[in-house]
Amino acid sequence: MKLWMGIAAGMGLALTLGGCESVSKDQCLAGDWVSLGRADGAVGRSSNRIEDIVKDCGRHGVTPDPQAYLAGWNEGVQIYCTPANGFNVGRQGSSHSGICPPALAGSFEQSYRLGYRLWSARSAVEQVETRIRSLESRIASDEAKLRQVDCARAKPEAQQDCRNKAQDLRNAIQDSRFQLQDARWSLLQKQAEYQATEAAVHAEASVLIPGYGGQ
């Protein structure tokens, strides 16, 4: 329990840092190098980050303990490099850091590829859904513009230009409707592909990942 509380606390420190590479003055003064290393390892950061920590803490007159940091980092790697985490990293569409040692890399990367397959299939569906929304919005906009065109009230010399404008809008609307029809058919296909991928991935993951329950 103490180990997991330390991990949670350390990961809280890492989340506080966000995308920043440096450590805070308070972290340097606290000197909890094991927890800091554990937090970095658990989120897939390279152990080379200790070099930045040494530089940043040096500005505050603090000398980190690289050995303590690396001991914690190795504990964190054991958390990061599980098959379950590999699957989750892949399912989020994230790239993995490549920090896993040979003994853990195989199952981690295999699980990562399974998760990434699921993400790719879902992304394909979402891309078509986005296109459908865009086409529907374009059609609605062009139809609104067409309703505002009143060539009967146009001056004689402007009537031809008005009719041309109206026809261009009708053509654009018709073209968008054809594209929308194709996109809706494509969505059905991508949804079917996603369902097939989801079933296949869950079947493989239930064998590969201990405790997997169709997360």
Image (cartoon, rainbow, N blue to C red):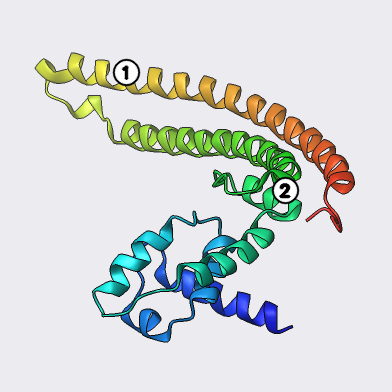
Q: Percent from the top left, x then y, of residue 29?
A: 37, 85
Horizontal placement of 205 versus 52: left or right? right
Of residues 66 and 133, the one nearer the viewer is 66
Identify the image quadrant of the N terminus: bottom right
Q: Which picture quadrant has residue 42?
A: bottom right
CA gap, disc 1 to disc 2? 61 Å
Q: Percent from the top left, x then y, of residue 79?
A: 68, 62
Asked whether residue 182 appears in the rendered view, the answer is yes
Q: Which mark is residue 168?
A: 1
Q: Earlier in the sequence, mark 1 or mark 2?
A: 2
Q: Percent from the top left, x then y, of residue 191?
A: 71, 35
Horizontal placement of 167 versus 103: left or right? left
Helix, strand or loop at label 1? It is helix
Q: Which picture quadrant has residue 203?
A: top right
Q: Which mark is residue 52?
A: none
Helix, strand or loop at label 2? It is helix
Identify the image quadrant of the C terminus: bottom right
Of residues 152 and 145, the one nearer the viewer is 145
Horizontal placement of 78 versus 35: left or right? right
Q: Is residue 177 above or below residue 40?
A: above
Of residues 12 and 39, the one nearer the viewer is 39
**Picture residue at 26% right of the left edge, 80% below the top:** 61
Amino acid type at image mark 1: Asp
Amino acid type at image mark 2: Leu
Q: Which mark is residue 104?
A: 2
Asked whether residue 19 appears in the rendered view, the answer is no
**Picture residue at 81% right of the left edge, 33% below the top:** 196
**Picture residue at 64% right of the left edge, 45% below the top:** 90
Q: Nearer the viewer, mark 1 or mark 2?
A: 2
Q: Percent from the top left, x then y, of residue 64?
A: 40, 74
Q: Is residue 198 above or below residue 4?
A: above
